[in-house]
Image (spheres, rainbow, N blue to C red):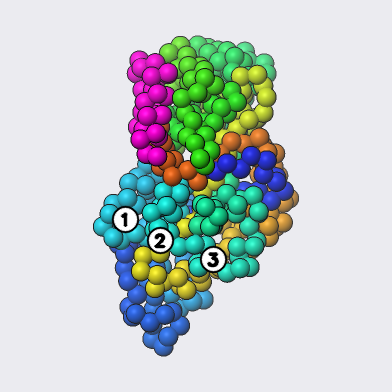
Amino acid sequence: MKKLNLRGVAVAGVAAAALLLTSCGFGGASSTSSSEPGASGTVTTLTMLAPTYSDGTKALWTKVIKDFEAANPDVKVNLETQSWENVEGVLKTKIQGNKAPDIYNGGAFAEFAAEGLLAPTSDVASEATIADFQESFAENEKVDGTQYGLPLIASARALFYNKSLMEEAGVASVPTTWDELYSAAKAVSEKTKADGYGMPLGNEEAQGESLIWFAGNGGNFGDGSNIAVDTPANVEAAEFMKKMIDDGVTQKDAGATQRTPMLNTFIQGKLGFAYALPQTVGQIKKENPKLKYGIAPVPTKTGTPATLGVADRLMSFKNDGSKTAAVKKFMDYFFSADVYTNWVSTEGFLPTTKSGSEKLASDETLKPFLDMLPNAVFYPTTNAAWNATDGAFKSLMGQIATGKSAADVLKEIQAKADAAK
């Protein structure tokens, strides 16, 4: 999921999609010939690693790759998909074994750029493809003035609420503040058989849940030059999160709960409130179309609008540099308007390209999320210490559910971030 300092992005062209692929024996496969793509009898084999955003991602990417290969018989793409919990660890193992993927779909990238591992975008995408991205997104794919990422998804989180459970619990209005969310979730927990609020602080996305709450108090994780986790605003937000857990208005074992199964619980009608993504709408339509639910802005301390924005990207590890032409063919193909918007709309994300935004502008399902993007706070992925910070949140933030004070947990995460500078 999928992460940049994109405050004030232009809503009209915002958004997003992300990558996933099939498991095809990935492992740094080389081309069948040292010649460049296009030479007679030469086939260049690309490896690609991507996370799963939905149950349908693998099949969706299988079709994209099949169509690409049919149009480009001199290029073969071996694809591997991993869960969000595993994908970063798999990537690190591959890099350590000198088998970095030729194409990678992920979040943080500044560390890789600083180590000289990534190919500049200008090497792996045409000028026309690069120019089609919304300027605010393209600018935030740069490290020291060089663009390394091709923006794939930019999505906002919103509050999903179960209307039936609210009615059963006697909750008359949708929460707009922390205190109102606490009271509403407490009523659902006490007066129904469901849990009130879903707080996933397991290693799938503890950092995402945390930033939603921090942003709701005017906080963030810092910027491209400074990671700032241990701040008064963030500590206050984390203390309220802990209060929700300690007072029993969340699900049990919040510190180990993963986002995906938690959202499945909401979709099944067994959870009052949860923060979710645009594609959750499609999942509900498919898995429980009778669910009576609504979507609203994220409750904040004072009611002032704020939310988490997520931006993931495609990037290319340059390895020996022999496959840039083949990578460019794939990038240009994928980001063409018809291919890209079909992928985006099927997954329920928002497009990052100008052409894609024009094609999907009338989609009413995406509108609530597009409306929230101007008030979104993003992960500081252009900071080289973000990878370590992200990992620290995933492994440590859940401790607030096991008795450790919020202040101590944030101090511990900040120390990990500082050590990575």
Q: Which mark is residue 291?
A: none
Precedes in sequence: disc 2 or disc 3: 3
**Mark 1 packing: few (<14 Cα in 10 Å), some, or many (20+)?**
some
Q: Which amino acid type corresponds to the residue marked 2 in the rendered image? A: Phe
Contact between labelled residues 3 and 1, with CB atoms less than 8 Å apart: no
Which percent across, then down, holds residue 398?
38, 26
**Mark 2 packing: few (<14 Cα in 10 Å), some, or many (20+)?**
many
* Direction from residue 132 to residue 151 in the image, left or right: left
Q: CA distance from mark 1 to mark 3?
A: 22 Å
**Mark 3 packing: few (<14 Cα in 10 Å), some, or many (20+)?**
some
Precedes in sequence: disc 1 or disc 3: 1
Q: SS of the residue at dot 1?
A: helix
Relative to 401, residue 91 above or below: below
Answer whether residue 407 is magenta in the image.
Answer: yes
Which is more toward the observer, 270 or 137?
A: 137
Look at discs 1 and 3 and give the one toward the viewer.
Answer: 3
Which percent across, then down, holds residue 157?
58, 36
Q: Which amino acid type corresponds to the residue marked 1 in the rendered image? A: Ile
Q: SS of the residue at dot 3?
A: helix
* Direction from residue 348 to residue 203 in the image, left or right: left
Quickly name the residue at label 3: 122
Residue 25 showing in the rendered view: no
Q: Which mark is residue 95?
A: 1
Q: Residue 394 sits in which quadrant?
A: top left
Which is more toward the observer, 112 or 260?
A: 112
Q: Residue at x 36, y 65 (%)?
A: 319
Quickly name the residue at label 2: 317
* Direction from residue 174 to residue 384 in the image, left or right: left
User: In the rendered structure, which segment of residues is drawn in magenta?
Assistant: 394-421
Which percent across, then down, holds residue 43?
39, 78
Q: Residue at x 40, y 64 (%)?
A: 318
Contact between labelled residues 2 and 1, with CB atoms less than 8 Å apart: yes
